[in-house]
Image (spheres, coloured by chain):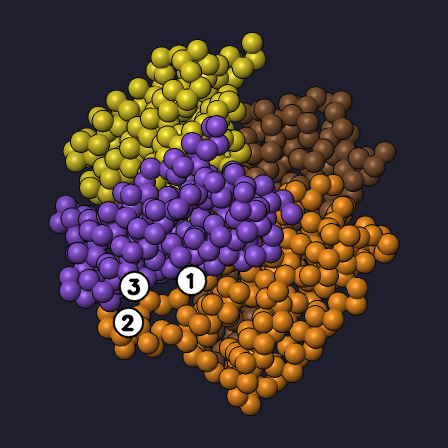
Chain colours: A purple, B orange, C brown, D yellow
Amino acid sequence: MSKGRLEAFTDGVIAIIITIMVLELKVPQGNDFAALASSIPILLAYVLSFVNVGIYWVNHHHMLHATDRIDGKVLWANLFLLFWLSLVPFVIRWMDEAGFTSLPTAAYGVVLGMAAICYIMLQWAIVVCNGRSSRLAAALGNDMKGKASLAMYAVAIPLAFVSPWIAVVLYVAIALIWFVPDRRIEAILKQ
Amino acid sequence: MSKGRLEAFTDGVIAIIITIMVLELKVPQGNDFAALASSIPILLAYVLSFVNVGIYWVNHHHMLHATDRIDGKVLWANLFLLFWLSLVPFVIRWMDEAGFTSLPTAAYGVVLGMAAICYIMLQWAIVVCNGRSSRLAAALGNDMKGKASLAMYAVAIPLAFVSPWIAVVLYVAIALIWFVPDRRIEAILKQ
Amino acid sequence: MSKGRLEAFTDGVIAIIITIMVLELKVPQGNDFAALASSIPILLAYVLSFVNVGIYWVNHHHMLHATDRIDGKVLWANLFLLFWLSLVPFVIRWMDEAGFTSLPTAAYGVVLGMAAICYIMLQWAIVVCNGRSSRLAAALGNDMKGKASLAMYAVAIPLAFVSPWIAVVLYVAIALIWFVPDRRIEAILKQ
Amino acid sequence: MSKGRLEAFTDGVIAIIITIMVLELKVPQGNDFAALASSIPILLAYVLSFVNVGIYWVNHHHMLHATDRIDGKVLWANLFLLFWLSLVPFVIRWMDEAGFTSLPTAAYGVVLGMAAICYIMLQWAIVVCNGRSSRLAAALGNDMKGKASLAMYAVAIPLAFVSPWIAVVLYVAIALIWFVPDRRIEAILKQ
């Protein structure tokens, strides 16, 4: 089974998610700087979401590049990842309408945390399909970043009920950890 | 005529359908758990629709993989399938606005049932184009799953007027039957 | 310059147009058959638009298949075609809101007529780029269908101000003429 | 790392942006010519935006065609470009709602100017990755058009607060400068 169509479909879904988020945002209610200023928080939330979805695309790109074979389980693990990513525009719209309050902010973390779990499941499914001695298995190593970001989401979600801003700071920190493309895979591939 | 562009176009349309459904859902009207709870039914309807459309994508992927040739009739059978799948976001939005009442729930079954009929037509068109002795014709066999799910939709649609929940249970059952990718084709291809 | 990316981009835009039209339609205002019945006209307008855009995709598919080379002029002629096709969801939405009255119905014809003109321009640009003795030039012949449908749009648009339904009948007739994929090209390619 | 997936993803995002802009426009509020006339300005803004995004696609097409290699920095520079292009439908919607007043018109220039800066960054990233003696580096030369259009955006944005129409005239002028595909690259490639 060729990976070309899996890549194309994933690209399509991520392209739509990344583009459609901004479509959902309310434009400034007026034509002055005060109206624009009141749109700043949701625009920053858009930037964070764009970077997060962009990180998934770049890492997916790297991972599939190091993948030789896929099977039905990989297709479904990938669909589950896309399912949770497709909910990003939904939670961002909720935050836009309900404000940066505790529950929507926590929901944002749940959606991104579930996407992180699905990404790890997708890694597993690909490693199982390609064999534990494959290039990808070596490249992933102990997956510290994946485990660290899951732990940080687990901490951030309850903290959103203490203060949404603590959760937001943690979400930004996780994005920064991942911003650099997965050097492990690049390094192994170069050898 | 190459199948590459048919696959790419289908991937594009399905990627949009799967992503745009969630865009249509109303976000919770408030920032508390009560508001979130009242959004649960429509979110579950979204999960069911995502799985259904995902099943079509995975099976389409398998079927085209086993296809050597296409013609104009295959292009149009495929377009008809996409037409009915494109109505899934429409009926899900209707259910969101009108509630899980009889007619919208029945309409959901009609749309998925018509998609199932078009998928069978697409199978026929591909078999005719590739010959009755082709790999795909052998792989499809007597297509028990396809016939069973059509029969179940035919039963579920009128039962929606007795109780929408009976229909929903049947829709979930059909999705579960199909959730496993088409092993027939995988098995034949391995030989 | 390779035609692969032109095809992929066109597929993407047409996939979005075809999917997004239904997103724009208002769902039935109620959960009974009366509400559904009042949505029938706009659903039929959606069917007509889906078939029209589908025809462009199928013919574009055939034409590019017979094309060896493209250049910058072909890229822009193709973008102009996509521009007019992208207005189809806009006019269909206008018809949904303003009813099947004269001006929106005429505007629908203008948009499809302009798309037809751009398609002819695209044919010219491809023939110029590939040479008048190319396969495509031979396949197109005197392009009776293209000229006939342009003439019919020119007649239908003013008649929309007499009665929108005359225009609608003509639009349906044009779609039926084109429904069959371009046999001329298929025939030449088979030789 | 292959450039195929970068091209496909970019095509997907640009296809969505170009198609979705029109979806955001309000249809004429009525079914007479007066209603249509009051929609003319925003339709012209759509035409300008379509042409601008089309220019990016055509030039991106030419540039990637002359590119042999990409890396992680190119992926992110490309994502930044797509980020700013994704804001085009947002500002056009703001102009639709708030009218052609100073701040939305200036914001339109800021978004297109930032896209122009990101495009230059993308050129740099590709040149660094492929080497200063690569075909592309030679083809770009001193990039007069890129510098001129940046300067014109820098002038147009403050002038929008004097009169939005001066800014609009400058935006149209920049689009006209770029309308011709990048002959520099075509010329070098032909050698």
Please tell me whether mark 1 or mark 3 is closer to you in this view: 3
Between disc 1 and disc 2, whose residue precedes?
1
User: Toward which corner of the image does residue B127 lie, by quadrant?
Assistant: bottom right
> Three-letter amino acid code at disc 3?
Ala
Measured Cα–Cα span from mark 1 to mark 3: 15 Å
**Residue named by callout 3:** A107
SS category of the residue bearing label 2:
loop
Q: Mark 2 belongs to which subunit?
A: B
> In the shown orientation, is residue D43 left or right of residue C176?
left
Question: Image point 86% across, 54% down: which residue?
Answer: B133
Q: Callout 1 environment at 10 Å: few (<14), some (14 to 19), or many (20+)?
A: many
Q: Which residue occupies the foreground of this view, A124 or B5?
A: A124
Name the disc covering residue B29, or none. Answer: 2
Q: Estimate how packed mark 2 is, as few (under 14), some (14 to 19) or many (20 or more) residues with alpha carbons within 10 Å.
A: some
Q: Nearer the viewer, mark 2 or mark 3?
A: 3
At which x and y percent is residue C157?
57, 51
**What is the x, y in percent for residue C91?**
48, 54
| Quarter-of-image position of residue A86 | bottom left
Q: On the image, numbered disc 1 is attached to which residue? A: B22
